[in-house]
Image (cartoon, coloured by chain):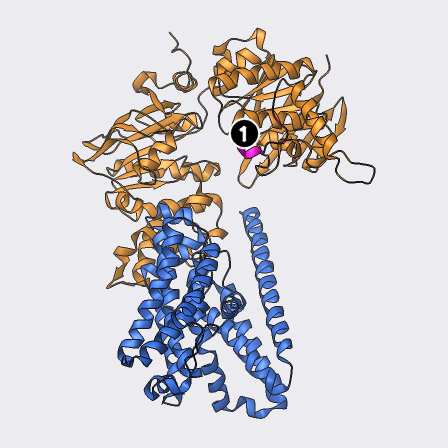
């Protein structure tokens, strides 16, 4: 545990150093207003990273999150166009996203198909469904109601609602993971599925629950995304699932399952968010941005690998000492 | 005649366990040497030493009288030692010919793999052992017996002088076993030295020329099969009752708790029936693969039996999942701690409370204080040595991990506890603690099932012993009949001694 904590402290430090380096040349970057902007801009990534982190904990992966986001976002935009009130749209997209996640979950649970294959398939199906629904048409800002577009941007106590939602979800799932039986089951299923079976935990059902959570969060993020950017079309958030997985990996969530924290996933997302927002300020090309995120992923994985090897040596030493 | 390969004074230790202690072994050309011993005698370890997987701590390996070393599996294979394992180690997605030649395929002048030579060579090798297999078939389309043939052809392709067969007949049908015997005769005729590991006495007497017996990692005896009787081998295997001390127990057996009748599974076991009482320790003895763990896993709801019923306190209970088994008061401490027991990466207290979370939470929220209390109560009872309950289970020694797993199950307050090989691979001190604790549990009125392959443990701890063989109960041993000879004979399928 202390190793994991120190690892998260290290990541937080890296983010601060990054911000510091940028601030040295562009002091405006560290103005509270701008930092709040960076956080707000990263909020969808954080929300998806929370769901992805839970799925990865259970030894699975959800590649369909971005497509799920796009589909739910489109449905939200179309409902809005049909005059459905926001109070229905919001729970509607969460349920829809959860249902799409449940499709992934059932395929993994009942048919035992590897999650990477399942979600690769559903990812394409979800995108295809958007095209079928719209014939490739865009829903633009002028076709959306003001209330629909305003909610994520409404400022409460200095932060937009979208940021508050991310904060609330961080808190909610922090509690779920550390303080509920379901949260414990996520760790147990990923840490040792065989032992989890013997402890009376239904491994498949736990993985199903993880996919439903991931899907529901993607559904919510779908509305936020469409409302914030005031546009919905087939290809929104295209490729975003890789950023989400990257945030988890950088945040120290073990890709083999069973280890990781919400704090880590959120820090991983923030790290990517800071890079994305800082580089244009410093005047570095967005292609560098990709290279830097890529390097961060490799570094994070290498760091994980050396850490687990070091603990292996500790086991032997203590065994010899006994 | 001089041996092809000799081991002298080979020792090998693992943390807490001395697997081999100055053992010797000689293998002669054109002869089959049977290696005999109980589970835990060190047979698998010696195979790994011979094939370069383990390095001995001490001792010599001699080939043709000269000392050699096998630092890697390749070195052993280059020296002409090859093993055909219980689960044959081959590649399912490759063809027969590719499997035979993997790593030493014939080359063309350009240095590319010569597919035709490979194919022709495979046919020649297979014909040499009387096998008519198409070399282009993928291995996954073959049965186990044919895979054995491929493994043997591979052994011949590297010009092996020593062939190790580790329980080769364990998974074969009657006809296939007969074919394997003929193959062994062919190999003998070609002058190969064969090390044959088997638990089956009829097989050993049919096929072996010489024997070597190990017990508890020590060399007990060796000689020619012609000079030895079955009873002598059994005696050497089990030895005098070991100087291990088991806790004295007041036998206070109460009412029946668990009754199993007509329990059957399509492939694993049939007609299993027994009654377990309060305060009783019921031993399950048998060879590896006799179906003991499979029965226990069905009782615990991991697999579903096709027929049969379980009654708990005279009420029929259908157990469909492990959660239902735990709710019915049955818990199972599995054999493979690493795989099925502890969740490494989670701290000790979370491992202990994993099946008991419903009791430590309120309104759906876990209460850490309750969890720590529960974990502390049970780990203290088991005398767990750990820096703190927050420590990762993966950092504990094997014996202490076992204690965490047992504490986890006791914390569910079970009525029936099934312990599968409870002391396998742990050191003597921890073993004694586990035995002590089992006696305490029985004294408190818990019903205990102990699956064990260690005869001293079975005899020392059990009130009654059920012996299984090939998926069926073959004997129930009580009172004066509880001797090593009776158990070994029943498990090996030998006639009961007069």
Colour blue maps to chain: A
Closer-to-camera residue (A141/A55): A141
Q: Residue at x 50, y 52 (%)?
A: B395
Q: Chain of mark 1?
A: B
Residue B135 magenta: yes
Q: Over which residues does the magenta segment extend?
A: B133-142
Q: Residues within 10 Å of mark 1 (few under 14, many from 20)?
A: some
Q: Give the colour in which the image draws chain B.
A: orange
Q: Quadrant of residue B373?
A: bottom left
Instruction: Please tell me whether residue B255 is drawn above or below residue B225 in the rendered image.
Output: below
* Apparent side of residue B141 relative to residue B332 in the rendered image (left or right): right
Q: Residue at x 34, y 71 (%)?
A: A172
- Please state the horizontal and vertical placement of residue A249, each as a whole percent of the image: 53, 65
- Please state the horizontal and vertical placement of residue B27, each as a whole percent of the image: 66, 19
- Please state the horizontal and vertical placement of residue B254, each as a whole percent of the image: 20, 31
Q: Quadrant of residue B460?
A: top left
Closer-to-camera residue (B263/A113): A113
Instruction: Please tell me whether residue A252 is drawn above or below residue A199 in the rendered image.
Output: below
Q: Residue at x 27, y 60 (%)?
A: B361
- Does any portion of residue B167 appear in the rendered image? no
Residue A255 magenta: no
- Please state the horizontal and vertical placement of residue A258, each as a whole percent of the image: 45, 57
For disc 1, the marked residue is B142
User: Which residue is outermost to the front?
Assistant: A135
Instruction: Please tell me whether residue B99 is drawn above or below residue A207 in the rendered image.
Output: above
Q: Which secondary structure class fits the magenta region best?
A: loop
């Amino acid at each position: 545990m202390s190793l994991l904590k120190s690892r998260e402290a290290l990541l937080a430090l890296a983010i601060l150093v990054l911000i510091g380096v940028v601030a040295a040349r562009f002091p405006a970057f560290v103005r509270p207003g701008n930092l709040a902007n960076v956080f707000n801009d990263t909020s969808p990534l954080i929300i998806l990273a929370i769901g992805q982190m839970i799925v990865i904990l259970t030894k699975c992966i959800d590649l369909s999150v971005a497509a799920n986001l796009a589909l739910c976002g489109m449905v939200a935009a179309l409902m809005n166009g049909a005059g459905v009130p926001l109070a229905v749209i919001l729970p509607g997209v969460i349920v829809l996203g959860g249902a799409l996640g449940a499709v992934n979950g059932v395929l993994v649970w009942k048919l035992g198909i590897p999650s990477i294959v399942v979600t690769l398939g559903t990812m394409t199906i979800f995108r295809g469904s958007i095209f079928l629904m719209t014939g490739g048409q865009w829903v633009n800002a002028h076709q959306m109601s003001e209330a629909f577009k305003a909610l994520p941007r409404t400022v409460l106590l200095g932060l937009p609602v979208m940021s508050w939602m991310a904060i609330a979800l961080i808190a909610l799932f922090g509690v779920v993971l550390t303080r509920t039986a379901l949260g414990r089951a996520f760790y147990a299923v990923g840490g040792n599925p065989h032992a989890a079976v013997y402890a009376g935990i239904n491994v498949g059902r736990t993985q199903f629950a993880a996919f439903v959570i991931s899907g529901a969060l993607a559904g919510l993020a779908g509305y936020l995304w469409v409302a914030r950017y005031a546009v919905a079309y087939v290809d929104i958030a295209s490729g975003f699932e890789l950023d989400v997985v990257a945030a988890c990996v950088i945040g120290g969530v073990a890709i083999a399952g069973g280890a990781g924290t919400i704090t880590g996933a959120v820090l991983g997302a923030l790290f990517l968010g800071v890079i994305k927002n800082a580089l244009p300020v410093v005047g570095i090309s967005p292609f560098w941005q990709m290279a830097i995120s890529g390097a961060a992923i490799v570094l994070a994985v290498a760091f994980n690998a050396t850490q687990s090897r070091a603990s292996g040596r500790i086991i032997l030493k203590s065994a010899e000492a006994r | 005649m001089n041996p092809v390969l000799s081991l002298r004074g080979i020792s090998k230790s693992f943390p807490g366990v001395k697997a081999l202690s100055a053992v010797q072994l000689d293998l002669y050309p054109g002869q089959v040497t049977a290696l005999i011993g109980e589970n835990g005698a060190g047979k698998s370890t010696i195979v790994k030493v011979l094939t370069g997987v383990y390095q001995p701590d001490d001792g010599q390996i001699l080939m043709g009288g000269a000392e050699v070393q096998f630092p890697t599996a390749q070195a052993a294979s280059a020296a002409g030692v090859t093993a055909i394992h219980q689960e044959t180690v081959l590649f399912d997605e490759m063809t027969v010919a590719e499997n035979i030649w993997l790593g030493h395929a014939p080359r063309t002048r350009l240095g590319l793999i010569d597919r035709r030579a490979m194919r022709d060579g495979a046919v020649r090798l297979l014909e040499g052992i009387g096998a008519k297999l198409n070399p282009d078939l993928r291995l996954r389309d073959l049965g186990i017996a044919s895979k054995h043939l491929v493994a043997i052809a591979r052994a011949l392709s590297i010009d092996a002088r020593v062939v190790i067969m580790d329980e080769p007949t364990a998974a074969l049908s009657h006809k296939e076993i007969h074919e394997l015997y003929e193959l062994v005769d062919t190999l003998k005729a070609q002058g190969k030295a064969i090390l044959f590991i088997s638990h089956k006495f009829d097989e050993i007497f049919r096929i072996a020329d010489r024997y070597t017996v190990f017990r508890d990692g020590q060399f007990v005896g060796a000689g020619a099969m012609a000079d030895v009787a079955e009873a002598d081998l059994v005696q050497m295997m089990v030895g005098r009752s070991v100087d291990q001390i088991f806790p004295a127990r007041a036998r206070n057996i109460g009412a029946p708790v668990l009754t199993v009748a007509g329990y059957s599974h399509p492939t694993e076991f049939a007609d299993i029936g027994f009654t377990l009482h309060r305060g009783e320790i019921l031993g399950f003895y048998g060879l590896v693969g006799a179906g003991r763990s499979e029965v226990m896993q069905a009782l615990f709801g991991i697999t579903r039996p096709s027929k049969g019923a379980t009654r708990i306190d005279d009420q029929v209970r259908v157990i469909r999942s492990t959660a239902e088994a735990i709710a019915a008061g049955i818990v199972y401490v599995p054999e493979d701690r690493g795989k099925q027991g502890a969740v490494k990466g989670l701290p000790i207290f979370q491992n202990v409370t994993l099946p008991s979370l419903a009791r430590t939470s309120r309104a759906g929220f876990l209460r850490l204080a309750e969890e720590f209390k529960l974990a502390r109560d049970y780990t203290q009872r088991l005398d767990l040595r750990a820096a703190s309950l927050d420590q990762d289970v993966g950092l504990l020694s094997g014996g202490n991990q076992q204690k965490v797993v047992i504490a986890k199950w006791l914390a569910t307050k079970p009525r029936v506890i099934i312990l599968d090989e409870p002391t396998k691979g742990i050191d003597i001190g921890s073993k004694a603690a586990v035995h002590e604790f089992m006696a305490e549990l029985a004294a408190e009125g818990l019903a205990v099932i102990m699956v064990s392959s260690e005869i001293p443990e079975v005899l020392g701890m059990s009130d009654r012993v059920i012996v299984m063989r090939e998926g069926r109960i073959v004997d129930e041993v009580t009172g004066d009949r509880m001797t090593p000879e009776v158990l070994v004979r029943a498990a090996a399928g030998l006639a009961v001694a007069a």
